[in-house]
């Protein structure tokens, strides 16, 4: 999933019945309903898997079996397992929604003017800030940033962070006690950024640890100037993998400490959300040379895969050793690329096809033709893969012997990209 789309969508409440609340539901007024989208009465369970896709400037949740729109969201953030969505209403209420039905599960009051930007893997904290800028680079920037950390259950009062400088919330530590932020430099006209950590218990801001769990020495914090950032949360929620491309003359922390240079053009930034260290896995040429949107990243089963559509190159790295083990050419393509790994296979959507690759050997197994330009890919349950094309989503059977048999199509008018799928059960 592209990083800027990882946590940016809004908040219409569709047919949401209040299931639990931090206060007495009989004493509270009904939740405000900005941009309501019709849904089945009583927030009934969907008939099929729920597809989340970009539609205009919103992220829409659509029942794959019926094509019915369940939610239409903007400026909201999904939980780590994507079964919960968090958004702020016009009445400054942070609400937690069931991502399958749109039903409201929790709500709590928050300060005005903020939107949900990041959610702790534990689900116990949500970072709220001003809406993300179209581009964080260039003017006017800002000299001070306000971020609010809220408990979606309302069990604790919101905590307000006022940071000197230009920051954007990025992710939480595994237990939700630290917030990782992106600091843009210089603050009023940034052209680069670095990842830092705010300890919510001590109220201190500082650098990350090295992979050896040692503090980064002063002056050795690396800054990034890349574009086309793509981020993937590990299935166990313990790490966040972020792909950076177009890094001219980039120096990693380990290079700065050792006094050596590097000419890497692309790498995967590995952020350990449990142990709070960071490490950069360099990618070989030609990664980073082609268009940023032509790069894709997938993580599953102890393996990390990166694909470059311009050259058709794919690499496999071990998530334990963080070393590249294999490299292969599977076919080049134009346009935007996306990838997902499931069941020992890597599925790469680019150009007008989906390539099925053995996740271990990187041998190309099949190619599924699409009726238009690829617009995202998502794994469904038990051997199901969804592929997006402009205006809709195709469902494929990916089990052995099925050979990519298309079983159905879900029209989604105005859809530009498929983001992910939530299983029906």
Image: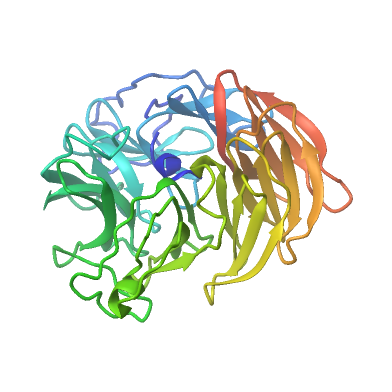
Who's the residue at 54% across and 32% down the image?
Answer: 53
- Whether residue 151 is visible here, answered yes or no, is no
Residue nearer the viewer, 126 or 374: 374
Left or right: residue 101 compared with residue 382: left
The quadrant the C terminus occupies is: top right
Left or right: residue 93 compared with residue 243: left
When the figure is inspected, residue 401 is found, relative to residue 218, above or below; the finding is above
Who's the residue at 28% across and 31% down the image?
Answer: 26
Expressed as whole percent of the image width and height from the top left, the position of residue 82 reads: 49, 46
Expressed as whole percent of the image width and height from the top left, the position of residue 362 reads: 73, 61
Q: Quadrant of residue 25?
A: top left
Expressed as whole percent of the image width and height from the top left, the position of residue 45 reads: 58, 34
Who's the residue at 35% across and 71% down the image?
Answer: 277
- Whether residue 285 is visible here, answered yes or no, is yes
Circle count: 0
When the figure is inspected, residue 114 is found, relative to residue 355, above or below; the finding is above
**Scheme of image coloration:** rainbow
Residue nearer the viewer, 239 or 135: 135
Expressed as whole percent of the image width and height from the top left, the position of residue 112 reads: 17, 32
User: Outermost residue toward the right?
Assistant: 401
Left or right: residue 297 compared with residue 146: right
When the figure is inspected, residue 63 is found, relative to residue 169, above or below; the finding is above
């Amino acid at each position: 999933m592209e990083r800027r789309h990882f946590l940016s969508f809004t908040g219409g409440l569709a047919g949401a019945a209040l299931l639990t609340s931090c206060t007495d539901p009989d004493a509270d007024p009904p939740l405000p309903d900005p941009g309501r989208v019709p849904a089945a009465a009583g927030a009934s369970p969907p008939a099929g898997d729920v597809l989340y896709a970009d539609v205009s400037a919103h992220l829409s949740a659509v029942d794959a079996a019926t094509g019915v729109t369940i939610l239409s969201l903007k400026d909201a953030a999904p939980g780590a397992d994507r079964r919960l969505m968090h958004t702020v209403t016009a009445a400054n209420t942070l609400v937690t929604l069931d991502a399958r039905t749109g039903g409201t599960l929790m709500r709590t009051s928050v300060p005005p003017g903020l939107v949900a930007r990041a959610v702790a893997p534990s689900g116990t904290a949500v970072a709220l800030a001003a809406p993300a800028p179209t581009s964080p680079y260039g003017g006017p920037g800002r000299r001070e940033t306000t971020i609010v950390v809220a408990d979606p259950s309302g069990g604790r009062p919101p905590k307000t962070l006022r940071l000197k400088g230009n920051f954007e919330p990025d992710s939480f530590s595994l237990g939700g006690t630290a917030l990782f932020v992106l600091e843009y430099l210089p603050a009023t006209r940034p052209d680069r950024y670095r990842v830092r950590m705010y300890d919510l218990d001590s109220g201190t801001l500082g650098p990350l640890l090295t992979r050896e769990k040692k503090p980064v020495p002063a002056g050795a914090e690396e800054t990034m100037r890349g574009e086309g950032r793509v981020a993937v949360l590990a299935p166990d929620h313990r790490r966040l993998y972020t792909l950076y491309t177009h890094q001219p003359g980039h120096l990693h922390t380990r290079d700065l400490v050792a006094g050596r240079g590097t000419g890497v053009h692309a790498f995967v930034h590995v952020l350990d959300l449990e142990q709070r260290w960071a490490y950069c896995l360099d990618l070989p040429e030609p990664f980073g040379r082609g268009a940023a949107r032509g790069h894709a990243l997938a993580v599953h089963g102890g393996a990390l895969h990166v694909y470059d559509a311009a050259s058709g190159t794919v690499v496999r790295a071990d998530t334990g050793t963080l070393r590249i083990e294999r490299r292969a050419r599977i076919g080049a393509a134009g346009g935007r690329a996306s990838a997902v790994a499931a069941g020992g296979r890597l599925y790469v959507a680019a150009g007008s096809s989906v390539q099925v690759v053995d996740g271990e050997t990187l041998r190309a197994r099949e190619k599924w033709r699409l009726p238009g330009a690829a617009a995202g890919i998502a794994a469904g349950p038990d051997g199901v893969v969804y592929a997006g094309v402009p205006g809709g989503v195709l469902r494929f059977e990916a089990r052995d012997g099925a050979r990519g048999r298309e079983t159905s199509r879900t029209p989604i008018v105005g859809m530009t990209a498929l983001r992910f799928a939530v299983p029906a059960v």
